[in-house]
Image: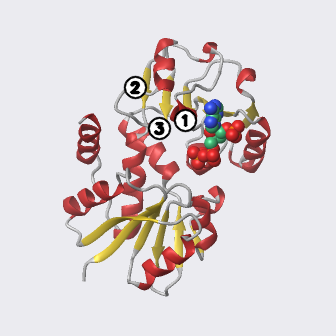
C-alpha cells in the first residue's frame, strides 16, 4: 500500500512541500503520496487524529500549528524539545507519535554544506526572537560560533530566548538600536519582510566579509538581503535552501534515505521565477 504523508497548516495553498516531497520520492524510488491539508484554526488535534487513523505515516506542520504539534506528540528529538515547536511528526511502530524540528538543521546544512559558509568561530547576529528563531538555535549553536547576538523589537523576548539557550554557547540579547560591532553572519528570522519592512539595525554591523541570510525567500532579492548588499555585504542567501533542506531532513526521518537536494532546489527556484 502507498504510504501517506502530508503537510498541515493554515493557510496551506502556497506550500511547496507537496512538490518537494513528491520530487524526493521520485528520485529515491519511494512509494508514497504527499498532500497538503488545510486545517481549521481550532481543529489541529482532530485533523492529526484523523490523518493517523487513516493510516498516515508522517506529517509536516507549518504556520500556525508548530506549537500545537509539540503539545500533541508523545516523544521528542532533543532539538524539538529545546525548540518547543515541531515541524515533523512520525507515527512509530507502537502507535506513539515522534516529533522533530528539522528547521534548524536544514538551515545549518544550507549555510555550511550548500553555501560553503562556515559558522564555527564566527560572530553571528540573529534578528527576531519568535518561533522561527527558537527553532534554529540549537543546531546553530552546535556549530560553535564565537558568539551569538539575538536582537529583537521586543527586547524581553530576546532576553528570555538567550537565557533558555545560554548553556549551549555564548549568547547575548539586545534591541535593534543597541546592536554594536561587526558580524560575519547576520540571519534575519523576523517576519518584518512580509510587510516589506527592515529591522532597524546599524549599518556598521555589515562588513565586506559579512554574509546575510534571510529565512524568507522570494523571486527577487529580499528587502533584507538588498539592504545588506547596499551596505557592502559579501554574499546574501535566502530561505529557499532552508525550505528544501528541512524537507530532506524530515524525509530522512520518515524513509531512512536522504534525497539529493540540488536538483529539487533548482526546480523550485525555476518555479518561483515563472
Ligand atoms: P515566527 O514563527 O515567524 O517566528 P513569531 O513567533 O510571531 O513568528 O515571531 C515574529 C518575529 O518577527 C518576532 O521576533 C517579531 O518581533 P516581536 O517579538 O517584537 O513581535 C518580529 N517582527 C515581526 N514584525 C516585525 C517588524 N515589522 N519589524 C521588526 N520585527 C518584526
Residue drawn 39% across the image and 84% down it = 54
The answer to whether residue 142 is seen in the rendering is no
- Given residues 12 and 264, the one toward you in this image is 12
Residue 86 picture location, percent across and down: 55, 61
Q: In front of the other: label 3 or label 1?
A: 3
Residue drawn 49% across the image and 31% down it = 213
Residue drawn 74% across the image and 50% down it = 164
Contact flag, marks 2 and 3 (Cβ < 8 Å): no
- Nearer-N-terminus badge (1/2): 1
User: Which residue position is annotated with label 2?
Assistant: 221
Residue 44 picture location, percent across and down: 55, 70
* Residue 2 higher or lower than 140, as above or below: below
Dot 3 falls on a residue whose secondary structure is loop
Mark-to-mark CA distance, 3 and 1: 23 Å
Mark-to-mark CA distance, 1 and 2: 26 Å
Q: In front of the other: label 1 or label 2?
A: 2
* Residue 170 higher or lower than 45, as above or below: above
Quadrant hosting ligand 1: top right
Mark-to-mark CA distance, 2 and 3: 10 Å
Quadrant placement of the N terminus = bottom left
Dot 1 falls on a residue whose secondary structure is loop
Instruction: Using residue 197 as the reference point, say whether residue 82 is left or right of it.
Output: right
User: Which residue position is annotated with label 3?
Assistant: 216
Residue drawn 24% across the image and 56% down it = 23
- Nearer-N-terminus badge (3/1): 1
Instruction: Using residue 58 as the reference point, say whether residue 77 is left or right of it.
Output: right
* Residue 139 higher or lower than 204, as above or below: below
User: Which residue position is annotated with label 1?
Assistant: 120
- Given residues 152 and 242, the one toward you in this image is 152
* Residue sticking out furthest to the bottom: 94
- Label 1 CA crowd tier, 10 Å (few <14, some 14–19, many 20+): some
Residue 236 picture location, percent across and down: 43, 25
Amino acid at each position: 500500500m502507498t504510504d501517506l504523508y502530508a503537510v498541515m497548516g493554515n493557510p496551506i495553498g502556497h506550500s511547496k512541500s507537496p512538490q518537494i516531497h513528491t520530487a524526493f520520492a521520485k528520485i529515491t524510488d519511494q512509494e508514497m503520496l504527499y498532500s497538503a491539508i488545510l486545517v481549521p484554526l481550532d481543529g489541529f488535534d482532530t485533523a492529526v487524529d484523523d490523518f493517523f487513523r487513516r493510516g498516515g505515516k508522517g506529517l509536516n506542520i507549518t504556520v500556525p500549528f508548530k506549537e500545537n504539534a509539540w503539545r500533541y506528540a508523545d516523544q521528542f528529538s532533543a532539538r524539538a524539545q529545546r525548540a518547543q515547536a515541531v515541524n515533523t511528526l512520525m507515527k512509530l511502530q507502537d502507535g506513539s507519535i515522534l516529533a522533530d524540528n528539522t528547521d534548524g538543521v536544514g538551515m545549518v546544512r544550507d549555510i555550511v554544506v550548500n553555501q560553503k559558509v562556515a559558522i564555527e568561530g564566527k560572530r553571528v547576529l540573529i534578528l527576531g526572537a519568535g518561533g522561527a528563531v527558537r527553532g534554529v538555535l540549537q543546531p546553530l549553536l552546535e556549530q560553535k560560533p564565537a558568539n551569538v547576538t539575538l536582537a529583537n523589537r521586543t527586547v524581553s523576548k530576546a532576553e528570555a530566548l538567550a537565557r533558555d539557550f545560554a548553556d549551549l554557547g555564548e549568547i547575548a540579547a539586545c534591541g535593534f538600536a543597541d546592536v554594536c560591532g561587526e558580524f560575519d553572519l547576520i540571519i534575519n528570522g523576523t517576519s518584518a519582510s512580509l510587510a516589506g519592512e527592515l529591522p532597524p539595525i546599524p549599518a556598521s554591523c555589515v562588513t565586506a566579509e559579512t554574509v546575510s541570510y534571510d529565512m524568507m525567500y522570494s523571486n527577487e532579492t529580499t528587502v533584507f538581503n538588498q539592504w545588506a548588499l547596499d551596505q557592502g555585504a559579501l554574499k546574501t542567501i535566502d530561505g529557499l535552501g532552508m525550505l528544501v533542506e528541512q524537507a530532506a531532513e524530515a524525509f530522512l526521518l520518515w524513509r531512512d534515505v536522504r534525497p539529493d537536494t540540488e536538483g529539487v532546489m533548482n526546480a523550485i527556484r525555476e518555479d518561483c521565477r515563472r
